[in-house]
Image (spheres, rainbow, N blue to C red):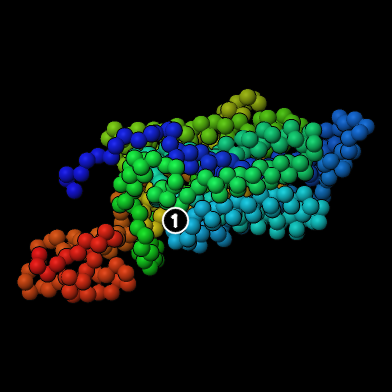
Amino acid sequence: MEDQRPPPKVPGFCSYRYGLSFLLHVCNLVVVAQSMSLSLTMVVMVNGTEPHSVTNFSANQLPAHVRNPVYDWSPDIQGIILSSTVYGRIITQVPVGYFSGIYSTKKIVGCALLLCSLFNLFIPLAADLGKTTIIVCRVLQGFAQGIVAAGQHDIWVRWAPPLERGRLTSISTSGLLLGPFIALLVTGLICQSLGWPMVFYIFGTCGCALCVLWVVLVYDDPRDHPCMSISEKEYITSSTIQQFSSKRQFLPIKAMLKSLPLWAISTGNCAYYWTYIIMNLYIPTFINSMFHVNVRENGLLSPLPYLFAWIFGILAGQMSDFFQSRNILRLLTIWKLFTSLGLLLPAFFSVCLLYLSSSFLSTIVFLILITATGSFSVVGSQLNALDIAPRYYGFLKGVTTVIGLMGGIVGSTLTGIIINQDLESSSFKIFILMSAISVGSSIFYLVFAAAEVQDWARDREQTCLRSLLEPRKPDLGFTCYKLDNSERVNDAAACWLSEEHIKWNNDH
């Protein structure tokens, strides 16, 4: 092993692994745009929000009440409709995270992306059928979105070299941040010119077209890609061989429940999603209630926080890989640094929004900073599970995401209740509670986070290899496990040490 030469230099930015990252970026962008567009169209869909303020149409255009149907939904119903996709996403995270490591990730994500797009095309009809129908449609759409979100993470176990993991994942997941920007920016213009139903038809059609590209361009394993260079294949496989295992073992559930580093990741995700979902769903409502702008101005102001969040997320991935590749900071220090920045800075700017914002401009600036700085945690607690348990990464990513989404559901539900009960002082209560959650979760993560593989996540074949290499006393005998069925054996000649069929002979 000491005689092995380093892998040859391979293309960086212009490579298939980065192409996969950009394709996932677009997939996440479209999926979030499909979900996020309703938060702005809700302004013109609901009675009492001046839906007929957009009435510049010629004689050959459809009347405003046809192009923009209006529904009588209470604030509570609006909150349920807006957050209903989160309920669907929760159901899928854990099972999809587990099975994505067994079955084809390409097929799982591709089918879910198609279903999500079809449900988006159905939303205008579902709204006409009634509030129950649109809630069910949004839950099913969230179910498909959850499959896309949970299934894609296992791809990086095979495709992301450790020193490029931060930038590859930040590029792909930053689509979740750019999606709201595109949705909110375009939605207002479409509502004004074509009517709000066209918003769902356009984004749904884009998702269906993206499914075709996904089927043609994506492969589960870099070794199966027909167009990739041999040097890039060798570079990826040699870099990821230690974090990938084709053998699926039983999940050590008890050990996972007792793992404080895993709980640290979960609390970090909970605080992140609490802030992200509230800002995602209610920024247009906040701007509309505070400044009473029309839908077009709202659509131009609401996307700005997500544009800067997208920029900050890309920069965070680049910086984390730079710190790791130059050995400037330890891996654990990098995760703690970016997680703290992603949780504490939004809390700080939330307080600033309450006490220092005295004008329209300052309010918009603080809203931008709250959302943008939260994206630092994308390369913190969001990636930490791959370090502590690479063989269970898909499953643990699903579990920690579920815990985070539960925090987001609680946060969005409480926000809806607070707004409904006391609209005037609702902002103070919402942002103070959000800040407290972020600070508490950051402290817990700083104390208990870890970056090394946990004992319960180690591969049995590695344990067997270590036991064989250690000096043995003659009276202790020999013990190891077969890799195929984990059967305990005492014959050294029958023990297979790895998938490369390295055998330990009795003669040795």
> Residue lying furthest front in this view?
226
Q: Relative to 138, is 175 above or below? A: above
Visible residue check, residue 272: yes
Going 31% across and 34% down the picture, which residue do you hit? 9
- The quarter of the displayed image where residue 44 is located: top right
> Residue lying furthest left in this view?
474
Residue 117 coordinates in the image, percent (x, y): 66, 49
Q: Is mark 1 on a helix, strand or loop?
A: helix
Q: Relative to 225, is 88 above or below? A: below
Q: How many marks overall?
A: 1
Going 84% across and 41% down the picture, which residue do you hit? 67
Residue placed under numbered mark 1 in the picture? 394
Residue 352 coordinates in the image, percent (x, y): 54, 32
| 97 or 155: nearer the viewer | 155
The amino acid marked with disc number 1 is: Gly
User: Image quadrant for the C terminus?
Assistant: bottom left
| 128 or 267: nearer the viewer | 128
> Residue lying furthest right in this view?
59
| 164 or 73: nearer the viewer | 164
Q: In this view, does 493 lie to the left or right of 322?
A: left
Q: In this view, does 381 lie to the left or right of 330?
A: right
- The quarter of the displayed image where residue 486 is located: bottom left
Determine crowd level at label 1: few under 14, some 14-19, many 20+ residues with C-alpha closer than 10 A. many
Residue 17 coordinates in the image, percent (x, y): 43, 41
Visible residue check, residue 278: no
Residue 415 coordinates in the image, percent (x, y): 63, 47
- The quarter of the displayed image where residue 59 is located: top right
Going 71% across and 41% down the picture, which residue do you hit? 202
Q: Relative to 275, is 405 above or below? A: below
